[in-house]
Amino acid sequence: MTATFPEQQRASGAAAFGRFSPDQALHIFDRTVDSGHEPGVIEVAPRTWWIQPGMVNVALFETDEGLLLVDCGCAGDGPALLETVRRLSDKPLHTVVYTHGHCDHAFGLWSFVEAGETPEVVAHRNLPGHLRRYLRTPGLNARINGQLEGSTGTRWLEREQDVVWPTVLFDDTLELEIGGERFVVRHGKGETDDAAWVWAPERGVIAAGDLVTGYLPNAGNPRKVQRYAEEWADAADQMAALRPSVIIPGHGDPVTDPDAILDELGAMARLLRLIVDHALAGLNAGVLPDAIVDSLEIPVELREHPRLAPLYDQPEFICRNVIRRYGGWWDGYPSHLLPAPQDRQAAEVAQLAGGVDVLVHRARALAETVAAGSGTVEDLRLACHLAEWAFLADRDHVGARAAYRDVLEQAARGQLGLMAQLNLRTSAQWVRDAERAERARSGQA
Ligand SMILES: [Zn+2]
């Protein structure tokens, strides 16, 4: 995407990540690192609050019998959330629902437990497995989520005692009665396979978790486990069928206009299904994955929808995720099945081209045509390949390092999606690694 991105999407994007703190984002399991912001509080319906302690939202429902809390933020959000809840109500914490096991949604409850609260903790049956997967892959998850060591010496969930485990598991639907009022907890796969959302029929309020975020669904993340685009669309339809008057999303501002809610949920379901249908049609017709993704076209009313901005994920990645779900990991090119090492391929290409300098020159020339406005998106992507070959062919080549960093940075800046930006900038990390390795070698010499 380029500078033609609609301003309306940009504006909605500004609110999308809430009371974000870069420091907290790097220490998401650290109970001592809060967002540094005063929590946001909005009473969206009688005795019903949207609370935003940091990057993520929490929903609070007060009944005569006690409180229903949906999500509880990052670990460091716990104390501020407890204080905010206690400012709003003195009722005991009756029940907590985890909308899913992600690090920003299900880890602030320890503050309430330490304060003596004894709520039931409701989660979908797959949530404990999600947390146990975290316990098995802390190094992987810390790395792909950019986490730094916290005050307990860990970078990710590594200890069972660092989470308040659910006490009630459900499969499809769970009806709660609190203070004589009915609340319905529904399962719907989306970003995760353990997602839950809460419907408060007497208030017309849905607490959606990350099934609604106000930007393009995070259904294609390049470095994460499987996402579920079609079930996500189903969940959006189920929510729309209830005709809610308020949605408290997992991130961003609450939505309090019933027509806007229906429009958003409908557009989200259409877009996800369009991508799924396109991917399946391509797979059934024997089209290779790259070509399926390249031929994906999104109608303008969905592409420019103010609540579907590709601020985090993007349609191509969602399409790839659908392809992965139904196919294997192979991209279909025979030589890629058992490939020669990438460095060896790059060295051969560089040699055939006449040297690393030739690749660097061509990469920069192509990138410059794009910067000048005459080149295409494809030209910049080609420049990325050339710069990468140059770097992999000779990691000690100063010009190749600079071109690799600069050209991929140009590509990153042309993207709106955070995942594309961060992952394209891996080149800068690799260049730093090469420089460090060189210094270490010269230090030893
Ligand atoms: Zn989230």
Image (cartoon, grey):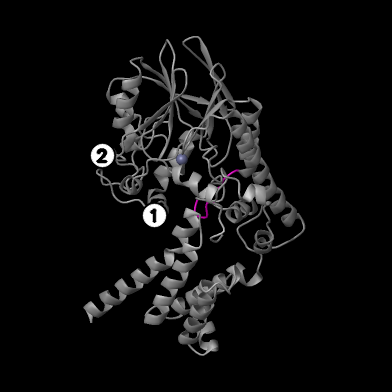
Q: In this view, does 104 lie above or below 317?
A: above
Work out whether mark 1 precedes mark 2 in sequence or the reverse, and give the earlier one.
2
Q: Main secondary structure of the magenta part?
A: loop
Left or right, 287 with respect to 74, comes to right
What's the residue type where badge 1 is placed?
Arg
Left or right, 42 with respect to 359, comes to left
**Tag 2 secondary structure:** loop
For residue 344, say whether it is visible.
no
Where is mark 1, residue-wise?
143
Where is mark 2, residue-wise?
32
**Tag 1 secondary structure:** helix
| Image coords of residue 208 (percent x, y) | 53, 32
| Image coords of residue 273 (percent x, y) | 68, 44
Residue lying at 62% horizontally and 61% vertically, measured from the top left = 330
Residue at the front extreme?
7
What's the residue type where badge 2 is placed?
Thr
- State the separation of the CA atoms marked 1 and 2: 21 Å
- In reply to whether residue 226 is colored magenta, the answer given is yes
| Image coords of residue 403 (percent x, y) | 43, 76
Tell which of 385 and 370 is nearer to you. 370
Report the magenta residues as a range: 221-228
| Image coords of residue 435 (percent x, y) | 32, 74
